[in-house]
Image (cartoon, rainbow, N blue to C red):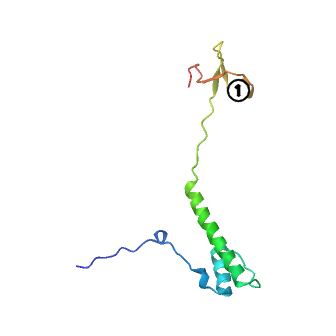
């Protein structure tokens, strides 16, 4: 009985590229393809290598940050406010919100 191995989808395969073995031309081609950046080949190999490694590190940081970003929906602002002493109900207005102690409520004056 032979076990069939299910092929991994592209998203599941993480490519690890060893840039340390690349020459200047390969580093430039890699940077152009992966990061759309044109490297200056007049620089030393070690400088180009460091630049590409920094770009690769930045990409990893962005991926980690994207995982951590969570969208938080702002709470809905009440449409009506009730005066704490009189109980009068007012429609939402910039001036009404400036009055200290105003209580958010529905149009019938019930607190929300």
Q: Quadrant of the C terminus?
A: top right
Q: Is residue 97 above or below residue 4?
A: above
Badge 1 marks a residue whose secondary structure is helix
Residue positioned most to the front: 46
Q: Is residue 18 above or below residue 67?
A: below
- Residue at 72% x, 22% y is 99
- Residue at 58% x, 53% y is 69
Residue position for label 1: 97
Residue positioned most to the left: 1
Q: Nearer the viewer, residue 14 or 80?
A: 14
- Residue at 68% x, 27% y is 92
Residue 73 drawn at (x, y percent): 59, 43
Q: Nearer the viewer, residue 46 or 87?
A: 46
Residue 89 drawn at (x, y percent): 64, 18
Mark 1 surroundings: few (<14), some (14-19) or many (≥20) residues within 10 A: some
Locate residue 93: give its quadrant: top right
């Amino acid at each position: 009985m032979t076990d069939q191995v299910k092929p991994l989808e592209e998203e599941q395969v993480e490519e690890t590229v060893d840039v340390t073995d690349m020459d200047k031309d390969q580093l430039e081609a890699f940077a152009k393809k992966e990061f759309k950046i044109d490297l200056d080949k007049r620089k030393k190999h070690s400088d180009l290598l460091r630049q590409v490694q920094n770009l690769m590190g930045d990409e990893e940081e962005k991926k980690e940050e994207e995982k951590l970003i969570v969208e938080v929906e702002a709470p809905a602002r009440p449409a009506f406010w009730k005066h704490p002493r009189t109980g009068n109900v007012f429609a939402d207005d910039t001036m009404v919100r400036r009055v200290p102690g105003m209580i958010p409520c529905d149009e019938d004056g019930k607190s929300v």
